[in-house]
Amino acid sequence: MNLTRYVLWVLLALGSTSALAEGGAERSRQFWEAFREDQQRLHGQADQALAERQRKTQQATEKLAKD
């Protein structure tokens, strides 16, 4: 094969990969945003429950200290 065919193959390969990659950045960003929201939903509630428990313990300690 001569140089012209190699150049043509390279151009076709680069053109097809850019066509396949269209919109990939947006899909990736959407995936990570959804992942972070799910993690916040799953783990955020446990953190809130822990904070509530600590607050109640603090209030009970303060009540005992007043008595």
Image (cartoon, rainbow, N blue to C red):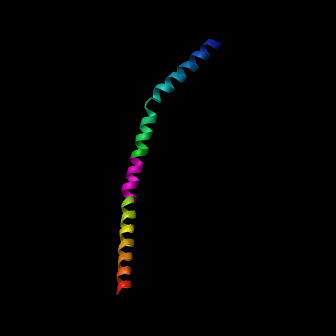
Q: Nearer the viewer, residue 26 or 15?
A: 26
- Residue 41 visible in this rendered orientation of the protein: yes
Indicate whether 14 appears above or below 28.
Answer: above
The residue at 35%/79% (across/down) is: 60
Q: Residue at x 39, y 67 (%)?
A: 51
Q: Is residue 51 left or right of residue 7?
A: left
In this picture, residue 14 sits left or right of residue 47: right
Q: Is residue 42 covered in magenta?
A: yes
**6 vs 42: above or below:** above
Corner quadrant of residue 9 = top right
The residue located at (61%, 12%) in the rendering is 4
Q: Position of residue 56 (x, y in %)?
A: 35, 74
Q: In the orientation shown, which residue stands out farthest toward the right?
A: 2
Region in magenta = 34-43
Q: Is 42 drawn above or below residue 17 in the view shown?
A: below
Residue at left offset 45%, top offset 29%: 22
- Residue 29's image quarter? top left
**Residue 35 % position (x, y):** 41, 48
Q: Pick the quarter of the image with the N terminus.
A: top right
Task: Please tell me whether the stretch drawn in magenta is mainly helix, strand or loop.
Answer: helix
User: Does residue 17 appear left or right of residue 67 in this picture?
Assistant: right
Pick out the residue farthest to the bottom.
67
